[in-house]
Image: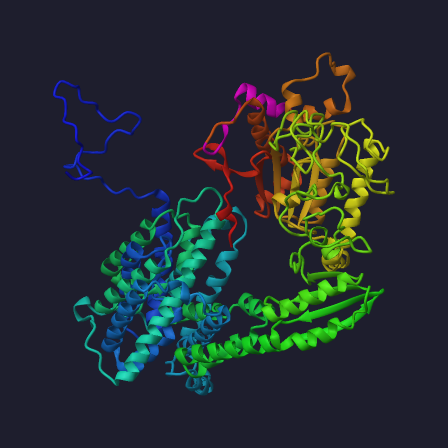
């Protein structure tokens, strides 16, 4: 009997249950098929993408020299087929500008029907690559090569379309177009130039319309407005121009058998496959980044790149068979789809359906479009493909030579030749970097610095050894590594020198030149060797403490407890604060005026309660007193340590120790950045208003550094409304300074769990009277609107995503963030910036015990704090 067949028989006397307990009711009966549901966001996104795709598809077909209907066929097939099968739900496929030069060359060399056959064969090749699951390998191509290829294609497109803009006919190559340009300028068609200038003007100015009316008008795509405006103007003025000519679908040319030399056809198929695949895969990765940056929860799955290749290959087969252009993922339409709020692949497919309807029903309207207007649109797209941002990026990564070589080769030789040359140059640059390493030695203030710039391989070991041996015995040495690779030979040479130098009384610090690039070569001296003569171990960390913290690394174990099994005299006094602690985190008492909520970690010598070895048991250490240091386990408040120093003295020593650690370890890493900020002044983009609670570390939870945040902290993260006689204008002054002087573009109000201020609002101190208020009570009255919001139920509800607030205190913490945002909007400078679209407000709730951030979003009229997931922060 098969295992999936139940062994019991049905009881005829047992009443049948409508549906199993604790399960949803069954769906519709089999004879009533479930109708597919299309979200409203997908419908609006599909319309927006369709309005962009229609003129661009005709323009790209015009630029390639293909029948104009081929662009509509490719757009429809890319939307329906690639949208349904592809692995990136929100990527919109169709005729892409990056394929214009390739397709134009194929049509010029082999004719249209053979070009369609090449498109079919390229689709088959893409399906084969998808089945082999090599999609990730395509991403190994250097971005400089890809950007250079797109820049070269953009230049080729722009130079060719200049002739149509001027009223002429483009030549077959860039050199021919450049040679023919003087004669074309001598025979300019004024009507074509006027229509082209009008198209470009609308295209550039439409996205910059100011004010609220401009914000509404900008919802209409600029490409559609530019072409429609030029078409209407040309028709109203009675200009005689070449217009779109869409022949009858009955005479539409379909794919034929490929004709031509075999090697040439193979090269054409490989070129088409390469360009289509790389552009589509890079587009899918870019769409994932755009989706992850959208506010609110995202239910769109990440792209399956192998499936995306299968979808693109199937679409190319269908497009080629139906007489369409090659299909690839299109960045302009995909980004518009994401920004329009699409939530599923239905938007892409619906946009394809709309293209089909337009191709069948709107032919008389489309034939009024002047070719000069389409040429101006495509020329603008080509110019935008030469991205200044990409040029700055490749220059910063020292890959400008690869970018320039690829772009120039694409312009003057072809796409396949340009990519091949780009790969060759990239390999040469990589070999040059691998074999050329600059090493120099210098002495500054008695410290010997060895700077290594480049990759450390066995070829650089002799020069590295010579530089390291210039550091005298017993001296302090700093090795700064500015590279991303170190092979085993270099590692061994550096480690051997470090061990020898420290054993002879010297100290060594091995760091990167940028924050966060410190290199760990050996274990701390406290665990592997006797204490050094200067009291330091690896990277200048005191060997006696056994501290594992590193500057600008992940924030953990900031108490720097001694490692397990460390000798008693190596304890630094940073151990647990409470006796009998189990390591659980507590939030009792909140942040202000209550228990600190700090977790008590079990450390060495901290036994169970009652053993007499834990912290706070009154045990005495055998270590001698050292000025400025604290020995023995930490003592409870009010007690005296083994060195005879009170708790206040121990806390002061913590401050000195922390400052010393900063000067020794972190200051060298951040000195350059802070010096720049000192010269240029602060230019933060965000104002971060949060509570004064010691557990809320703003730079940690926002992964920010110097100069990133303008932080305002107060008890309860309160924003007094304007005009209140509070006797404290500090928050309003900070707002005015942030808005008027620093011109911040974002303000965040951050509340947190276990807030003592909110607890004080819920449980006011008994016996307090309005006439005898303390400064804290006078300040907390700005939180009374938040308390009324919770108790009276005023305003929309506030909740956490996935669960209700744990108690009234947490509910008040959430409501307080929303209330303070309303107080912010009442301030004149904030209201003015919001009206002009220059400022965004954010609400944030940080749960201390969970180390989890929640971001405020609007959902169906209800305010919800959604969990910020780790994957939301990628890329």
- Nearest the camera: 499 or 194? 499
- Nearest the camera: 580 or 695? 580
Q: How many numbered tags mark residues here?
A: 0
Q: Is residue 12 visible?
A: yes
Residue 499 position (above or below residue 19): below
Q: Quadrant of residue 736?
A: top right
Residue 186 position (above or below residue 564): below
The residue shown at (69%, 54%) is: 528
Residue 724 magenta = no
Q: Which colour style is shown?
A: rainbow
Instruction: Locate residue 304, reporting x and y percent.
Output: 37, 56
Question: Is 597 displayed left or right of 90 in the figure?
Answer: right
Q: What span is colored magenta in the figure?
A: 784-802
Residue 798 magenta = yes
- Nearest the camera: 255 or 640? 640
The residue shown at (20%, 71%) is: 254
Q: Is residue 735 visible?
A: no
The extreme left residue here reads 12
Instruction: Locate residue 511, reporting x and y percent.
Output: 69, 61
Residue 261 position (above or below residue 852): below
- Nearest the camera: 707 or 836? 707
Question: Is 764 displayed left or right of 404 in the figure?
Answer: right
């Amino acid at each position: 009997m098969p295992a999936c067949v139940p062994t019991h028989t049905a009881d005829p006397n047992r009443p049948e249950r409508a549906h199993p307990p604790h399960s949803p009711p069954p769906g519709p009966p089999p004879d009533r098929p479930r109708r597919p549901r299309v979200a409203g966001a997908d419908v609006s996104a599909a319309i927006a993408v369709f309005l962009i795709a229609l003129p661009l598809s005709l323009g790209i077909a015009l630029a390639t020299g293909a029948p104009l209907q081929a662009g509509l066929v490719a757009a429809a097939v890319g939307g329906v087929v690639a949208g349904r099968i592809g692995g990136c739900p929100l990527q919109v496929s169709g005729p892409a500008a990056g394929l214009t030069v390739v397709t134009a060359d194929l049509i010029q060399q082999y004719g249209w029907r053979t070009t369609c056959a090449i498109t079919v064969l390229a689709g088959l090749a893409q399906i084969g690559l998808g089945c082999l699951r090599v999609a990730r390998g395509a991403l190994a191509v250097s971005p400089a090569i890809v950007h250079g290829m797109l820049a070269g294609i953009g230049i080729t497109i722009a130079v060719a379309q200049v002739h149509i803009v001027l009223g002429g006919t483009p030549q077959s190559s860039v050199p021919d177009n450049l040679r023919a340009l003087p004669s074309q300028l001598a025979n300019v068609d004024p009507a074509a130039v006027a229509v082209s200038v009008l198209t470009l003007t609308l295209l550039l100015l439409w996205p910059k319309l100011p004010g609220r009316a401009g914000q509404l008008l900008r919802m209409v795509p600029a490409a559609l407005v530019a072409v429609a405006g030029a078409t209407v103007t040309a028709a109203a003025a009675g200009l005689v121009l070449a217009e779109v000519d869409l022949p009858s679908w009955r005479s539409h040319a379909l794919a034929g058998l490929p004709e031509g030399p075999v090697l040439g056809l193979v090269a054409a198929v490989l070129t088409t496959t390469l360009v289509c695949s790389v552009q589509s895969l890079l587009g899918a990765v870019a769409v994932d980044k755009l989706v992850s940056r959208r506010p609110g929860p995202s239910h769109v799955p990440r792209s399956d790149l192998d499936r995306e290749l299968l979808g693109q290959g199937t679409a190319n087969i269908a497009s080629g068979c139906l007489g369409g252009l090659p299909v690839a993922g299109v960045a302009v339409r995909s980004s518009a789809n994401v920004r329009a709020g699409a939530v599923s692949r239905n938007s892409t497919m619906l946009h394809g359906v709309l293209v089909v309807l337009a191709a069948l029903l709107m032919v008389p309207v489309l034939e009024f479009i002047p070719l000069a207007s389409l040429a101006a649109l495509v020329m603008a797209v080509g110019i935008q493909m030469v991205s200044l941002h990409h040029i700055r990026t490749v220059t910063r990564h020292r890959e400008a030579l690869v970018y320039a070589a690829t772009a120039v080769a694409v312009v003057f030789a072809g796409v396949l030749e340009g990519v091949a040359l780009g790969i060759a140059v990239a390999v040469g640059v990589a070999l040059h970097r691998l074999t050329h390493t600059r090493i120099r030695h210098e002495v500054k203030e008695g410290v010997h610095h060895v700077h290594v710039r480049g990759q450390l391989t066995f070829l650089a070991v002799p020069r590295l050894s010579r530089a390291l041996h210039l550091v005298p015995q017993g001296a302090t040495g700093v090795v700064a590594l500015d590279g991303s690779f170190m092979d085993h030979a270099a590692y061994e040479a550096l480690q051997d020198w470090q061990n020898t130098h420290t054993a002879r009384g010297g100290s060594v610090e091995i760091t990167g030149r940028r924050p966060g690039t410190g290199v760990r070569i050996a274990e701390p001296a406290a665990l592997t060797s006797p204490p050094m003569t200067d009291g330091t171990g690896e990277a200048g960390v005191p060997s006696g403490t056994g501290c594992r913290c590193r500057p600008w690394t992940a924030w953990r174990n900031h108490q720097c407890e001694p490692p397990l099994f460390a000798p008693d005299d190596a304890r630094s006094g940073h151990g647990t604060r409470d006796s009998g602690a189990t390591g659980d985190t507590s939030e009792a008492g909140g942040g202000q005026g209550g228990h600190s909520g700090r977790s008590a970690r079990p450390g060495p010598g901290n036994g169970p309660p009652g053993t007499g070895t834990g912290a706070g048991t009154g045990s005495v250490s055998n270590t001698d007193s050292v000025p400025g240091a604290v020995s023995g386990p930490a003592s409870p408040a009010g007690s005296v340590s083994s060195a005879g120093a009170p708790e206040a003295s121990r806390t002061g020593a913590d401050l000195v120790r922390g400052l010393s650690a900063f000067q020794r370890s972190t200051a060298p890493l951040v000195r350059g950045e802070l010096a720049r900020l000192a010269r240029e002044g602060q230019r933060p983009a965000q104002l971060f208003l949060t509570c004064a609670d010691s557990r809320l570390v703003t730079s940690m939870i926002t992964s920010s550094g110097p100069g990133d945040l303008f932080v305002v902290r107060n008890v309860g993260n309160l924003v007094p409304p304007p005009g209140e006689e509070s006797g404290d204008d500090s928050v309003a002054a900070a707002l005015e300074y942030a808005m008027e002087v620093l011109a911040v573009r974002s303000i965040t109000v951050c509340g947190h769990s276990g807030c003592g201020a909110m607890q004080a609002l819920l449980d006011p101190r008994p016996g307090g009277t309005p006439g005898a208020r303390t400064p804290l009570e006078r300040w907390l009255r700005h939180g009374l609107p938040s308390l009324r919001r919770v108790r009276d139920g005023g305003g929309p509800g506030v909740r956490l995503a996935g669960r209700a607030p744990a108690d009234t205190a947490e509910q008040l913490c959430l409501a307080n963030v929303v209330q303070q945002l309303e107080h912010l909007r009442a301030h004149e400078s904030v209201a003015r910036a919001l009206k002009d679209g220059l400022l965004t407000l954010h609400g944030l709730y940080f749960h201390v015990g969970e180390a989890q951030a929640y971001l405020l979003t609007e959902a169906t009229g209800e305010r919800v704090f959604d969990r910020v997931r780790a994957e939301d922060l990628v890329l």
